[in-house]
Image (cartoon, helix red, strand yellow):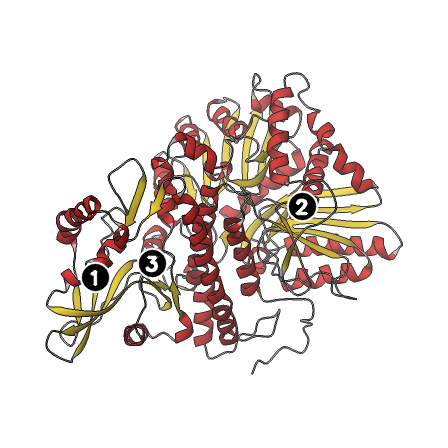
Amino acid sequence: MSSKPFDLDTSFTQNRELSWLRFNERVLAEAADATVPLFERLKFAAIFTSNLDEFFMIRVGSLFDLSLLKQVHIDNKTGMTPEEQLHAVYDAVAPLYKRRDKVMEEIEEQLRLHDISRVQMRELIVSEQKYVENYYQNTIRPMLSPQVVDTSHPFPHLINKARYIAVHLRAKGKEKEQFGLIPVPEALPRTVFLPGSAVRYLLTEQILLAYAEDVFSMYTVCDKAVICVTRNADINPDDENFEVDDDYRRHMKRVIKKRARLACVRLELFGGEVSTELREFLMRQLALKKEQVFKSKTPLDLSYVYGLSERMTPAARKSMTYRPFKPMPSAMVNPNESVTKQVMKRDLFLSYPYESMEPFLKLVEEAAVDPAVVSIKITIYRLASSSRLVEALTKASENGKDVVALLELRARFDEQNNINWSETLEDAGCQVLYGMEDYKVHSKICLITRQEKGKVQYITQIGTGNYNEKTAKLYTDFCLMTSDMEIGQDASEFFKNMALSNLDGEYHALMVAPNAMQSRIIEKIDEMIAVAAAGGNAHMMIKTNSVTDRVLIDRLQAASDAGVKIEMVVRGICCILPQIPSKTENITVTSVVGRFLEHSRVYCFMANGESEVYISSADFMTRNMTRRVEIACPVKSQQVKQRIIDFMLTMLHDNVKARRLMRDGSYLPVSNGEAPLSCQDAFMIEAEEAASHAAVKPHGVWQKMTARFRKKKQQ
């Protein structure tokens, strides 16, 4: 029985974990969408699968930890205990497995029409059978390390997300039952392609499953399955006990290793019918309940699908993938002029992945060799495995610039990559800081300080996403470059405070978490409430990845109740339910899941014809507001501000990929009676048109192309 806090109104809120599962269900819906190119559908199924893996490792792992504590932790959106949430999650996940199986069956049937087949052993022709037999005997068999489980051979530790063949055995001529395990060797390729012009392949675990009888030849194999365990990977370094003077990189390396040994939270089974005996044996050994075991007809790890494109013919690849698109040159940036000079004249703005990251990279590269540049300071959360940005920073240090990189080693699952980059930067003479002891530094800010003719000049870059050249081609993010002195002075103060571990700095233009962002956002919401109370026109547009923070949720509800129109674009988790009478009836929530991952964060506050626009690194989540260092930056350029507003209006008119959150937590397609509009397709076309017209009309193309949405909103 849950003990819901009596002071919290849960009539307009929902559980974050169930909301996230609905988001991932929308990812799976893209895999089921016949209008999406076939190979892209397959990739969406793979994304759904990897998303679900991370969800179990992090979110379910966290709930599992909370359920073990003596102190009861109650969800402040639903009043549910951790145990109740876990039961609800398991119940919600089971149907998703069945739906994925159906979607994958449809996709693989259609791929066969293009001569791309994941075949079953029973489908092999004679020549293929010989090929697989030879491959097993000469390549797979020598690498195997099978074992039986008995008093002399205890059940081994199963590695997180590794694949094993679990076998139910009976000694020949005896009634005694035993069990065995065969680890699928990680050194082997995941896919085994068969000879011939068609793309016919098996997975290594399929072959090993078929040859389990050969491996355990002295037994009778009663039952067998491919299995995979998911372990709790929610290690919070802040909770670990380590000495302050202990080397932080060494500590993080230990944390990464420890992940592999944490408690099991899920067991997945693939291949054939699994007997009750085998299932119960595995449950006993792994201390799992029946609701934590999931049977799948789909391979348990779909990461192999990305490599299939290399085997496709050019014609097949063209017919089954999205039309080619590469980030365009920005129409706001003159390629024939120094980026530094342009930023000193006016604010520059980039919209990834529609526009290239190139101008920002050039800005840092110019700073690395600019005699007037004194220092470059930057926060780093995630980087590409190959990074021009790091090259520019190391070059700047070698040229005598003061380079400070505040590098967050706790970027989940990127820890090792960041450890490697920290060593590279330090070797080049850069000063590397590792963030705050109890707070992740998630802000995206770069400050270039110049000294020319006795004057200090600042160039500040603020982003909504990481400095990752790879994801800048896949995620939607904003990048603002400005020489505004107020923003630059705040940025300079920010880096001084970070070096001193001071979270209580005062800033004029920037909103900075954890000390002031939440309170500043509430101030802006309250201003909208005051305008509405006075009979004015108050309107907010918010774009974020997730909405979970109870403080902000309650203030948004109060604003809706006061008559403020609130339009939210929330890709993933959204714990506030819209359209609840007398509660949130002035709130609409739209989610867009499409070709690119929506990642930018925008806060727009509009009243009586005036507008304030911020871009930010922070979602409306408690962790972002209270446990992370985040930055939101005001957009002062009217041209850039209008472009962001036009961007939001375009998203809100999407009726192809957009889904609208209903009061019961479900999502429905948007039906607005207008011509079909996919906002991501529109942004690609606009970027291409803007790039082609930039030489003729370099700085005015955006206003013309998005005027129709602005006119509609004004009406």
Q: Which residue is mark 3?
A: 161
- Position in image of residue 290 (x %, y %): 39, 75
Q: Specify the quadrant of the image occupied by residue 707.
A: top right
Residue type beneath disc 1:
Ile
Quadrant assignment, res 575? bottom right
Q: Residue at position x 69%, y 67% from top? A: 12
- Of callouts 3 and 2, the N-terminal one: 3
Select label 3 or label 2 by which is in front.
Answer: 2
Determine whether the residue tagged by mark 2 lies in a helix, strand or loop: loop
Is 139 situated above or below 65? above
Disc 1 packing (10 Å; few <14; some 14–19; many ≥20): many
The foreground one among 401 and 172 is 172
Residue 322 x, y percent position in the rendering: 50, 36
Task: Give the Cα separation between the discs numbered 3 and 1.
Answer: 14 Å
Q: Which mark is residue 494?
A: none
Q: Which residue is mark 1?
A: 182
Q: Is residue 213 left or right of residue 478?
A: left
Identify the residue position indicated by label 2 in the image.
655
Question: Going by the image, does 456 lie left or right of 376?
Answer: right
